Structure formats: C-alpha cells, structure tokens
Amino acid sequence: MDLKIDDILGKLQLPEKSVPLCLRADLQARFDTLERDLRAAQRAPEQDSLAGSGATAREIANQIEAIRTEMQAHTVAFLLRALPNKEWSDLLKQHPPRKGNQGDLVSDYNTETFPVAALAACCKSPKMTEDQAGQLVDAITNGQWSRLTMAIGELNNGGGDIPFSVAASALAGGTPTS
C-alpha cells in the first residue's frame, strides 16, 4: 500500500501536554510540617497502649491526606499544544533578541517577551491573552513558570517519540516496542 502525503496530513495531530499547577502552594508548608511530625511519631514509642500501636501516626497521616486532597482540589491542569512549525518560527521572529542582552543572544529570542507570548499561543485550556499570560507569570513561582516553559519547549522542539510506561506495560503485558 502506497502511503500518500494527503493521508498523512489528514491524520496529523500536534503534540499536547497537560501541566498541573497547584494554586494553593502555600499548603506545602503545612504538608512538610506534618511529614516531619509523622516521621517523629513513627520513631516514638506509643504512649497509649489502649489506642493501639501507631494511633498518633495514623492521625497525622489522615491530616496529610486531607492537605493533599485540598491541594488537589486547588490544582489546575494547563493544556498546552505545540504550534505548527511556521507559527512557532513566526512567533520567534516577533520577539528578536535585545541588543547587548547576553541571555537573549544565547537563546536567540527576547527572553522577557517570547516565553509569555509562547504560553498564550500554546495554552489551549485555559485560553488566555498575552496580557493574561503575563499576569499569570507574575503571580506564580519561578518553579511553576519553569514547568510551563519547559513543557512548551519540549512540545515545540521535541521529537514526538512514542512514550513508554513501565507501570502500564507491567500491568497490561506490553513491551517497549508494542
């Protein structure tokens, strides 16, 4: 069977990636404290033998799970989609490196404006304008911003290889090539 380019073009889908960000990252401090308390409770001998072994540790573990549930409830998944090659190239051209800015010269684009524009262009859900993307960037942590920009870079500059899951393969009986 001869493969035709029109068949390929008709089936082509751009890569997508979901990047979850917790909007209540302030809860991490409480989580960390409870984790330390849990480790201490697991090391300490139980004082109340009627309560059974590990009652304090179980209570702390329940608090940890409650914090995790709250953090998950405040997590938003940003759905990012790669841009077609020409759109990506055109977007890069709209944000040329600033003269004398070493970071821009190394990256070959304006490192202040291009990433924000790329977020607005690549984010399919929630939809946002460049201004809104800039407001988001100003409100999140550098680590959260790095997760978004790395995903955008991987989507637009990656090879599109077929992913492999060891866990899924073990359960489903697949192989790295299946």
Image (cartoon, rainbow, N blue to C red):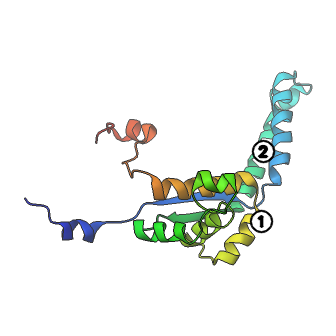
Q: Image point 42% across, 60% down: which residue?
A: 15
Circle nearer the viewer, 1 or 2: 1
As shown in the figure, which amino acid type bears the numbered disc 2?
A: Ile
Give the residue number, with chain letter if any, for mark 2.
64
State the image coordinates of residue 149 (x, y, percent, origin top left): 61, 57
State the image coordinates of residue 99 (x, y, percent, origin top left): 67, 61
Compared with 150, 110 (above or below) is below
Q: Image point 86% across, 34% down: which residue?
A: 37
One can see residue 59 in this view: no
* Local SS, label 2: helix
State the image coordinates of residue 169 (x, y, percent, origin top left): 38, 39
Q: Nearer the viewer, residue 55 or 83?
A: 83
- Graded by Cα atoms within 10 Å as few (under 14), some (14 to 19) or many (20 or more), the crowding at tag 1 reads few
As shown in the figure, which amino acid type bears the numbered disc 1?
A: Asp
One can see residue 142 in this view: yes
Quadrant location of the N terminus in the rendered image: bottom left
Quadrant location of the C terminus in the rendered image: top left
Q: Earlier in the sequence, mark 1 or mark 2?
A: 2
Left/right of residue 11 with respect to residue 41 in the rendered view: left
In 3D space, how far apart are the residues under numbered discs 1 and 2 (Cα atoms)?
29 Å
State the image coordinates of residue 83 (x, y, percent, origin top left): 46, 67
Give the residue number, with chain letter if any, for mark 1.
138
Left/right of residue 109 with respect to residue 85 in the rendered view: right
